Structure formats: C-alpha cells, structure tokens
Amino acid sequence: MLIPQRLLIVSAPFGARLDAKTVARRIERGITDAGRPDPDVCPIEPTDAAISDTRELLDLLSFDTRMRASRAVVLASERLRERALSGSLTFEIATRARQGGVPTYAVTADSQLDAFDARILDLQAIIEARTARELTSAGYELASLAWPHA
C-alpha cells in the first residue's frame, strides 16, 4: 500500500490579523518551500464554525475522506486549552484522525496543554507560531516531521 504524500491542513483564524485561509496558506508555503507536495487546505472560518453540530460541519467538509487520503492532519488553532477541548472541533478532528490511524500535528499561537492532554489527543508534535512568518517556519518544520527520512 502506498503512503499518501499530502498533508491535510485544517485551520482556524489566529486572531483578527490572520484569517483561517491565511493561516493555512502560510503553513502550506513552508511545506512546499521544503520541497514537499502541496497540502490539502481546509480553512474553517467563524461562519463555518457557527454550524453548531461539529459532526455536521466535518461531514460538509468531507473531512473523513480527505483525512484518509492524507499522510497526516495538521490542526492549526489559535489556542489549545484542556478545558476547552471537550466537544470542540479540535477534539473531534484529533479523535477521528487517531481512530483512522492518521498522525496529527498541531500548530498554535498558545498551547496550554500538558503532556497528558497532548497524549489524549495523540498529537505527534505541537508547534507554536504567532505570526505569519512563524507559521511559514512551522510548515517547514512540519515537512521534516512528516517526512523524517526524506
């Protein structure tokens, strides 16, 4: 069986300055600058997140199909906090990826997760990035993490 080569980037806004699409594109830029394939980009804007049923939103985005076709999932969320995880989109995505056997990485401006919380989500790595430039660097780092022997 061939290992998928594309990453799936699921991104949310990082404050008012960086909308979800910009976050995803900056991470994508770092990945492609590192010589890796163009990722599948799935930005989730606040209007999308207004759909109250997380499962419905992920179904509308064809998340499961896209995830299974990916080498790994990259969760880009401005904040990761234990108390906000239960029932969140982040938790649902990480759970589906874990159950599907797809590795998950996180990019965040502010991680307040301890090692136990990261393990519960089965995150391979958490990369902190606050600016557009740091998001691009995070993409470059993800390329080396997702393709360690390339």
Image: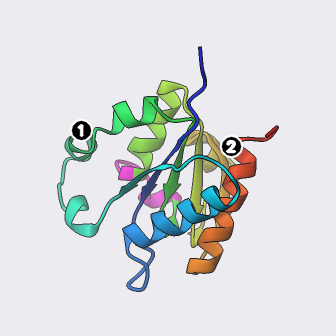
Asked whether 116 falls inside the magenta stretch, the response is no
Q: Residue at x 75, y 50 (%)?
A: 144
Q: Nearer the viewer, residue 7 or 126?
A: 7
Horizontal placement of 45 versus 127: left or right? left
Neighbours of disc 1 within 10 Å: few (<14), some (14-19), many (20+): few
**36 shown above or below 43:** above
The residues bearing labels 1 and 2 have C-alpha atoms spaced at a distance of: 25 Å
User: Where is the N terminus found, in terms of image quarters?
Assistant: top right
Disc 1 on helix, strand or loop? Answer: helix
Secondary element under disc 2, as helix, strand or loop, is: helix
> What amino acid does circle 2 point to?
Ala
Counting from the top left corner in percent of width and height, residue 89 is at 36, 51
Instruction: Name the residue carrying label 1.
Output: 59
At 46% from the left and 59% from the top, the residue drawn is: 83
Asked whether the viewer can see residue 61, the reply is: yes
Q: Is residue 142 left or right of residue 48?
A: right
Dot label at residue 146: 2
Q: Position of residue 87 (x, y in %)?
A: 34, 48
Q: Label 2: how many residues lie within 10 Å, few (<14), some (14-19) or many (20+)?
A: many
Q: Are marks 1 and 2 in contact (CB under 8 Å)?
A: no
Q: Front-most of 140 and 50?
A: 140
- Looking at this view, is 144 or 107 the one in front? 144
Residue range corresponding to the magenta coloring: 82-89
First in sequence: mark 1 vs mark 2: 1
Q: Mark 1 or 2, which is nearer the eye?
A: 2
In which quadrant of the rendered image does the C terminus lie?
Answer: top right
